[in-house]
Amino acid sequence: MRSFQNKHILIIVENLPVPFDRRVWQEASTLKENGAEVSIICPKMKGYMSSFEVINGIEIYRHSLPLEARGAFGYFLEYTTALFWEFVLSWKIYFKKRFHVIHGCNPPDLIFLVALWFKIFGVKYVFDHHDINPELYFAKFSKKGFFYKMMIFFERLTFLTANFSIATNESYKEIAIRRGKMDEDKIQVIRSGPKLDRLKLLAPDKQFFKGRKYLVGYVGVIGEQEGIDLLLESVKFIVSQRSDIQFAIVGGGSDLEKMKQLTAVQGLNEFVDFYGRVPDDLMIAVLNSSDICVNPDKPTEMNNLSTMNKIMEYMALKKPVVQYDLKEGRFSAQEASLYALNGDTHDFANKIIQLIDDAELRIKMGNLGYSRVLNELSWEYEKDKLIGFYTRILFNETEVSTVSNKIPV
């Protein structure tokens, strides 16, 4: 494959800081390793407050956000502030050294507003489709009114602006074709495969068990659609029958304090530990210590069609999984998971108990998941797709029509 030497790629991500956003960091590192210069614009968040730093030769520019948004006004304020800083920092970077590609990672579907200005100068826009925003909006607010239609409109404009698009799975590719009206040959599926050199297999650390015999782990964002409230219902059902299982929840998000309060109200504080957003080494230690791991994502269309990084990270650490029966979750885990009836918290609890009480099944499922990641889903396989796709973008493809030549439907 051709080296990307003398090519400069700007990555813009709005909802998570880098390198905390593991998918973005893997993409950036792969492009850098293949010779490209890589700059990143992202928000500041706890643990990532430096306005500028260089990590492994990758320049990271971080901007402030006014708040972690909740509600329409909060999201408007967050996105407006982010767009302002993305625009300012993009020009700062461009004047420092011209970039050839803007690689925009949603949510939200508004980064095209920055990319449009640079397309005038021949910069290509690659849309990295992390979340299906219309479905995400419906999952949060259960409405399909004006703002939902606006999400559809922004999504359509994003695909119209994009020269190329990266889909995280086949479901997202189908949306890019059907709803985004994008040519199939401009889309590449690149899954968020875990890097096995990061996810080291370690011995359990008993400090996380809090004196109990078993540990159930969770890692991920804690928001409206992640189903931590459903998980707590399952925990309540489990502890009504037994007291030998501890639950470890790793991650931050807009609902973290709300879920802590719910835990207290349900009398579960001694059984559930919230670790918040933590460094990789602590997160990996908790997961390695877990007997099983859970993905309680609510059975929404958003979650049904989305690939969750945590599932493959669990599998990379040989952990059997319990989750609800959702399309992309089942594709990722296959026989490495048990699947509860959608929304049935008692069935979810019973699946946890089933695995806790069957060590042989836990080992079998853990090995199946690890083998699938090792031989099919790890970043070692996905990074070649990214390099091949960028070879087309940087060297072989002619510029597609600009957004001004197309009319959204």
Image: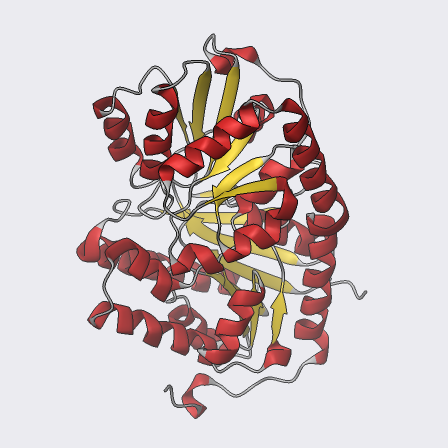
- Looking at this view, is 149 or 333 the one in front? 333
**Which residue is at a point 23% across and 63% down the rendered structure image?**
143
Q: Is residue 113 above or below residue 261?
A: below
Say which quadrant the C terminus sits in: bottom left
- Looking at this view, is 323 or 61 the one in front? 323
Q: How many marks?
A: 0
* Residue 196 at least partly seen: no
**204 relative position to 105: left or right:** right
Q: Position of residue 54 (x, y in %)?
A: 57, 43
* Residue 336 at least partly seen: yes
Way the structure is coloured: secondary structure
**372 relative position to 87: left or right:** right
**Which residue is at a point 41% across and 69% down the rendered structure image?**
114
Q: Is residue 398 above or below residue 327?
A: below
As drawn, the residue found furthest toward the left would be 73
Q: Is residue 242 above or below residue 117?
A: above
Q: Position of residue 320 (x, y in %)?
A: 60, 34
- Looking at this view, is 308 or 73 the one in front? 308
Q: Position of residue 22 (x, y in %)?
A: 55, 45
**Which residue is at a point 44% across and 84% down the rendered structure image?**
403
As drawn, the residue found furthest toward the right would be 1
Q: Position of residue 406 (x, y in %)?
A: 43, 90
**380 relative position to 10: left or right:** right
Say which quadrant the N terminus sits in: bottom right
